Image (tube, rainbow, N blue to C red):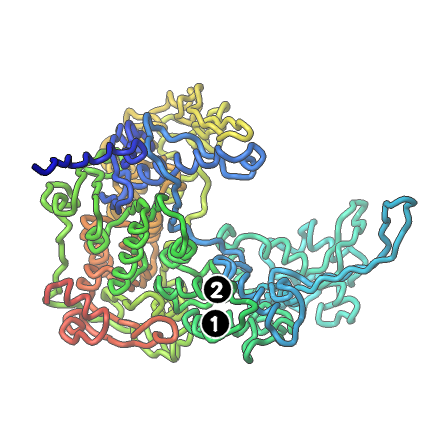
Amino acid sequence: MAPRTKTPQPPAPHAADSHDLIRVHGARENNLKDVSIELPKRRLTVFTGVSGSGKSSLVFSTIAAESQRLINETYSAFVQGFMPTQARPDVDVLDGLTTAIIVDQQRMGSDPRSTVGTATDANAMLRILFSRLGEPHIGPPGAFAFNVPSVTASGAITVERGNKKAVKATFSRTGGMCPRCEGRGSVSDIDLTQLYDDSKSIAEGAFTIPGWKSDSWWTVRTYAESGFLDPDKPIAKFTKKEMQDFLYREPTKVKVEGANLTFEGLIPKIQKSFLSKDRESMQPHIREFVDRAVTFTTCPECEGTRLTEGARSSKIKKISIADACAMEIRDLAEWVRGLDEPSVAPLLEALQQTLDSFVEIGLGYLALDRPSGTLSGGEAQRVKMIRHLGSSLTDVTYVFDEPTIGLHPHDIQRMNDLLLRLRDKGNTVLVVEHKPEAIAIADHVVDLGPGAGTAGGTVCFEGTLEGLRASDTVTGRHLDDRAVLKDEVRKSTGALEIRGATSHNLRDVDVDIPLGVLTVITGVAGSGKSSLVHGSIPAGENVISVDQSPIRGSRRSNPATYTGLLEPIRKAFAKANGVKPALFSANSEGACPTCNGAGVIFTDLGMMASVSSPCEDCEGKRFQASVLDYHLGGRDISEVLAMSVSEAEEFFGSGEAAIPAAHKILDRLVDVGLGYLSLGQPLTTLSGGERQRLKLATHMGDKGGVYVLDEPTTGLHLADVEQLLGLLDRLVESGKSVIVIEHHQAVMAHADWIIDLGPGAGHDGGQIVFEGTPADLVAARSTLTGEHLAEYVGE
């Protein structure tokens, strides 16, 4: 008999392989209500739910924040001192975390010297390439950098070696910065006719600058009595020296009526007092003056390239570094592919990989010299993705915040492929998303809700996409929602004519945008939509433009202060109680003295995270105890600020607390779908979509006839898109014209008129490829938008 062989037993699983889950227990960050959840590692998990349901609180403020905090703690105390400090999230257990890499939608800094090239290291590699291969050779990589000025110095230096002795030395560094524009590419020119009337003398009140009255002590009197100028002579008759002193003199101490004052030329004085400030923070009349008096023109010396003549003269195969940065990235990638130089082979390979990543991610239409502040939120997010695409890291957690924002339906598939590629390399991918096409690729779906704000913060569903579809959650019910084409479209009442538009990639575009209807501008990312709308429609008194730029405000700012809602509420409280309105402001007389009206005390623990704890005196209410004794309609001011918008609308709508001015503002906030926000919620906690809708609500009372909206569906849940369409309809029916730049097919289907740009992006775009009704676009299927819209409406 043959001997029996035993079947080998499979080895016991290794202890290290048992950690396949990220476990969260008892998460209470922001509006989360003791959320407990287990997420599979090395899978793609999509988080869904209405705006404000707690998705970002769970993914960003809890999981990603704790991962980053733990990694920061591994650095020395010295290094931690330079890093942003993070407090531990409010959660009981967080287990199985891996290194988190956050790719969010924060706009890139708008520093004038920050470009796509500098933000992605592509410029650094190009500079090394030109310093090695450029002919004529002009110097090291810094000679091609528009952030590095040329420096020369000479003098005596003391060498401490044996006997000290002074040695004559010279030093020079060749930089690439254009000396005229200092690497900005544009120069500001001040229109002198807007500053003064040269037919008058200073004594006669020649200045036309806001706030510069003829008797103002600190400005006009200084010029009149400085001794450098004749105050009774018309400015037009000043001598050459007087004009030089008047416009450009360096700060000089002068005595005016026994007082020591500083006399300074008009141009530097205007630059310091007006041009050094942020335009957005200026008062409207000052901003109007600056817009009128200052023009920005391309630098005549470097022709906008930001570089010195030397840097532009050094070339590789007849291409200078300025030419290379101005090319579209897909063309630059082809040019780099054609360079064959063994001495710099590793550099060429790395540069090639970076440029190919741009093309692969759908940003081949950008140029490296594009200022990073001009990128949209979606473009900025994809530029940040580039450094992770070729990364050799595995087993990390990538966290994305709506990566499909700003993407045409045609490009969403490409983004989906990239997310799956990151997952297939063994990474955990967490995505906050609203688009059904992106939710469709999830291995695991987590739906938060059921509502927004205090009505959210719980997990409504966890499982597969099919399970979500069958579930009775808000997301599940709306997942297969499809807007239908309108049987009848509204007729236009006129047209906004655009002629010969050439901004960015537009090719001499002529188009009539109909007025009195809902017009949707479509096209793939980079086709020229924003250039057409923002670059060609003059933002005048009649045009109200609502974009997604961040709202400037500190953690003290909230929806009540931003919309002007707090003003009528404070007055009503003051009138009802016979006291001053300032008492009902947490930034003024009514503020709790312990926390200065912040509601929390921040304790700085040096190298450790600063800790915020509710103020013990006011219990986080922000006001002095005496202020809370005053009531309106049975509520004190802190209770009013804790209300949600919907609750406040009811409260101020009728009865003793009825305030028509406040009710009108609250009505608009509910209209734009922000009923769940609390009046006192800090603006810093709002998402990009919430910020845009808050701006829209504040502008709805303006008298403008044309509203321009830039992707208003950003961050909106499928269920809320319907409400937005109703709002757009109401705006049009009230006699307004609404122009929307949009990628969402539901908005396209609902439009009265569509203008489609394309056919591609960058130099393949910039043309009108279709004008007409949505039904005509679907019937023709002549463009990418037409094909996707037809598929969406099921035609």
Please name whichever residue, 517 or 88, is drawn nearer the observer in this view of the structure: 88
Residue flagged by tag 2: what amino acid is it?
A: Leu
The reply to whether the C-beta atoms of the residues labelled 2 and 1 are less than 8 Å apart is yes
Q: Provide residue 298's location: percent of width, then percent of height.
A: 56, 71
Instruction: Check the picture and name the quadrant holding the N terminus.
Output: top left
Please name whichever residue, 734 or 120, is drawn nearer the observer in this view of the structure: 120
- Number of the label disc, if any, that sits on residue 351: 2
Instruction: Check the picture and name the quadrant holding the C terminus.
Output: bottom left
- Residue 590 appearing in the image: no
Distance between mark 2 and mark 1 Cα atoms: 8 Å
Q: Provide residue 300's location: percent of width, then percent of height.
A: 61, 74
Q: Provide residue 478's location: percent of width, then percent of height.
A: 14, 49
- Residue 357 appearing in the image: yes
227 in relation to 160, above or below: below
For residue 101, what is the image quadrant?
A: top left
Q: Provide residue 2's location: percent of width, then percent of height.
A: 10, 38
- Number of the label disc, if any, that sits on residue 336: 1
Element marked by disc 2: helix
Q: Which of marks 2 and 1 is nearer the N terminus?
A: 1
225 in relation to 293, above or below: above
Residue 179 located left or right of residue 362? right
Q: Determine the residue located farthest toward the front in the rendered image.
A: 1
- Residue drawn at (65%, 64%), measured in percent from left and top? 140
Please name whichever residue, 97 or 364, is drawn nearer the observer in this view of the structure: 97
Residue flagged by tag 1: what amino acid is it?
A: Val
